[in-house]
Image (tube, rainbow, N blue to C red):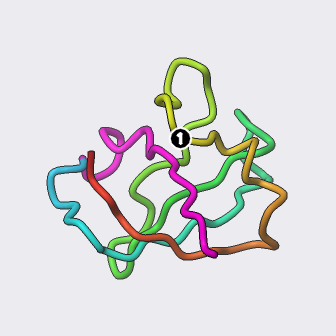
Amino acid sequence: MYQPIYVAVSGTQHYYGADFLKPSQIVHLIKDPDNPHDHEAIKVDMTPIGKIGYVANSTYTVPKGCRGAGRIYDTFEHHVCGRCDLL
C-alpha cells in the first residue's frame, strides 16, 4: 500500500511566497547537487512559475512528521513529483 511522505518547503519568502499554493497542486522535487550551501539540496519547482523554494533540511526547519531533504535524497534519481497538502 502507498504510504505518503511529507516534506516541508522552506525559503519560499525568497521567491514568490506561499500564499498562492493551493491543495492538490503538483510540485516537482529536483535534486540540486551543485548547491553551495547543501550537497543534499532538493529544489521545489512549480510549472510554469519555476523555483518556489527548497525541501527543508535542518532541525530548525523540518516540522514534526515531515522528512528532511537528506532523508529522501537517495530515494529518487533526479526528479520526482509531489502534491501540495497545506497544513
Q: Name the residue at the front extreme.
A: 1
Question: Looking at the image, which residue is at 69% across and 47% down?
Answer: 41
User: Where is residue 60 shown, x and y percent of the image?
Assistant: 52, 18
**Residue 10 position within the rendered picture, expressed as x and y whole percent measured from the top left:** 44, 39
| Number of numbered markers | 1
Q: Which residue is drawn at 42% across and 39% down?
A: 11
Identify residue for label 1. 66
Compared with 38, 44 (above or below) is below
- Could you say whether the residue bearing mark 1 is in a helix, strand or loop? loop
Q: Please state the horizontal and vertical placement of residue 65, each as a whole percent of the image.
A: 51, 37
- Quadrant of the rendering where the C terminus is positioned: top left
What residue appears at the point 24 percent right and 47 percent down from the top-left corner?
17
Q: Quadrant of the N terminus?
A: bottom right
Q: Residue at x 71, y 57 (%)?
A: 32
Q: What stretch is highlighted in magenta?
A: 1-17
Q: Is residue 9 left or right of residue 22?
A: right
Name of the residue lying farthest toward the top: 60
Q: Is 19 on the left-hand or right-hand side of 69?
A: left
Q: Main secondary structure of the magenta part?
A: loop
* Amino acid type at image mark 1: Cys
Name the spot of residue 39 as percent of width and height, x first: 80, 42
